[in-house]
Image (cartoon, rainbow, N blue to C red):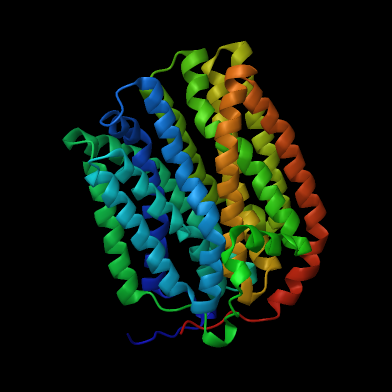
């Protein structure tokens, strides 16, 4: 395949930008499609409702576990062999995972589909490394924000698409997701260039293939350590919320599935507005670290409002809390990714983004499990109130990282991003 060259200062090539957009939106749509359809898919294989809930929980967790184990290795491999091959492999794995969910036939096939998708589930970490390769440090936050807005669209559209297609059969949404993802693989194969030239690639160390040693290696770098700790801390309560918010609305406000769907729709709309319109203005005026701290403060306010639903029994704090928390989340992702990218050298973008995704996957394993236990045993407000405390710790971690990041970032900015090759 003939290589493509383009200086990043002139902008990302249109076909590359289209591929990045497709990857982001299809990743989020695929996740969103599963949300309304998965319980009905599970019921085909498990008749006991209680057991169905446990199976669904494990089906969700197994993806995060596999992603935690594989993301650092995939990031390190992309630093060694380039982004193109690894990213195409990741997208192909997602397509196969969706296809197996559609084919089904036995419960183990569903788990195999989620395992394959999880093992190759570094789509976004490698995509962020790709963006970091082809954009100057000062512009990365802009493109990370663009990706966040794009994924917000996917999270908004995915559940709606899944619900509509499920009317033609519960497996149809999975076949549709597989087909769209295969198209993305083909498009990337023919139009996606390599972003990391050979002279910028790092040597692969076997320790980088071990998720625990690779994560320890990334955490050993002072500015990265505290940023990754902050990412883990804010993701734990947010992951718990993703499970408990539906229960809170059902148990305390007596909402049905349609009402709960409004919550997820409002999150998607808020993400699009914040990351598409507000984010760049704030980062330009205040900087990435200040925007990240502001996002965490908004999340604290959101958790408090949601916890108050237990006492107020009104939909107003629920909806306002959802919107405020979604605003905070919309500011956090791009700003923290920008800080991580700026603190890492050009040769370690894949490893760092893989570490980022591993920390988030680890949080998504712990958060729903612990949050569910707290909701049942310590009261409906407890997961949200604990989120306030944990988010305060995340703010403290960013404050510790801030001076170290400010020292490292100028050194990395001296190196111009490479051309596409």
Question: Residue 355 occupies which quadrant of the picture?
Answer: bottom right
Which image quadrant: the N terminus?
bottom left
At 68% across and 60% down in the image, what residue appears? 339
Q: Answer left or right for 291 relative to 186.
A: right
Q: Residue at x 36, y 44 (%)?
A: 111
Is residue 311 positioned above or below 166 on the image? above
Q: Which residue sits at x=73%, y=69%? A: 409
At which x and y percent is residue 181? 31, 58
Residue 291's spot in the image, x, y percent? 68, 50
Residue at the spot 61% in from the left edge and 43% down from the top edge: 235
Classify residue 42 as left or right of residue 219.
Answer: left
- The spot of residue 233 in percent (x, y) is 68, 43
Residue 79: x and y, percent?
55, 74
Report the front residue among 188 and 47: 47
Can the viewer see residue 107?
yes
409 shown above or below 366: below
| Camera sees residue 295 | no
Picture mark count: 0
* Horizontal side of residue 336 vs 411, given as left or right: left
Q: Residue furthest left?
A: 168
Relative vertical location of residue 251 with respect to residue 155 in this rendering, above or below: above
Viewer-proximal residue among 127 and 149: 127
């Amino acid at each position: 395949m003939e290589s493509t060259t383009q200086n990043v200062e002139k902008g990302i090539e249109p076909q590359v930008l289209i591929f990045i957009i497709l990857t982001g939106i299809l990743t989020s749509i695929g996740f969103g499609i599963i949300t309304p359809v998965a319980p009905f898919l599970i019921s085909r294989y498990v008749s006991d409702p209680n057991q169905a809930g446990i199976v669904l929980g494990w089906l969700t967790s197994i993806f995060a576990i596999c992603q935690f184990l594989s993301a650092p290795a995939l990031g390190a491999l992309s630093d060694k062999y380039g982004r193109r091959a690894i990213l195409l492999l990741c997208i192909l794995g997602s397509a196969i995972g969706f296809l197996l969910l559609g084919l089904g036939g036995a419960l183990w096939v569903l788990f195999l589909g989620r395992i394959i998708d999880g093992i190759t589930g570094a789509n976004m970490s490698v995509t962020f490394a790709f963006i970091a390769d082809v954009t100057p440090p000062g512009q990365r936050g802009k493109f990370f924000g663009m990706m966040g807005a794009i994924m917000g669209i996917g999270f908004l559209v995915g559940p709606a698409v899944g619900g509509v297609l499920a009317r033609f059969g519960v497996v149809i949404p999975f076949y549709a997701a597989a087909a769209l993802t295969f198209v993305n693989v083909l498009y990337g194969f023919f139009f996606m260039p390599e972003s990391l030239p050979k002279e910028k690639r790092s040597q692969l160390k076997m320790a980088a293939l071990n998720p625990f040693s690779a994560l320890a290696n990334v955490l050993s770098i002072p500015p990265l350590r505290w940023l990754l700790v902050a990412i883990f801390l804010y993701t734990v309560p947010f992951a718990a919320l993703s499970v408990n918010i539906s229960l809170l609305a059902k148990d305390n406000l007596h909402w049905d599935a349609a009402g709960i769907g409004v919550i997820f729709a409002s999150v998607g709309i808020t993400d699009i507005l914040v990351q598409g319109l507000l984010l760049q203005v704030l980062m330009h005026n205040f900087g990435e670290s200040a925007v990240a701290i502001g996002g965490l403060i908004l999340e604290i306010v959101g958790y408090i409002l949601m916890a108050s639903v237990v006492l107020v029994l009104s939909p107003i704090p629920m909806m306002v809390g959802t919107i405020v928390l979604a605003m905070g989340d919309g500011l956090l992702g791009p700003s923290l990714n920008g800080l991580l990218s700026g603190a890492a050298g050009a040769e370690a973008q894949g490893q760092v983004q893989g570490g980022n995704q591993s920390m988030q996957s680890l949080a998504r394993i712990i958060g729903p499990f612990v949050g569910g236990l707290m909701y049942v045993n310590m009261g409906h407000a407890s997961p949200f109130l604990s989120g306030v405390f944990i988010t305060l710790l995340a703010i403290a971690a960013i404050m510790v990282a801030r001076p170290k990041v400010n020292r490292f970032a100028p050194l990395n900015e001296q190196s111009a991003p490479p051309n596409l090759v």
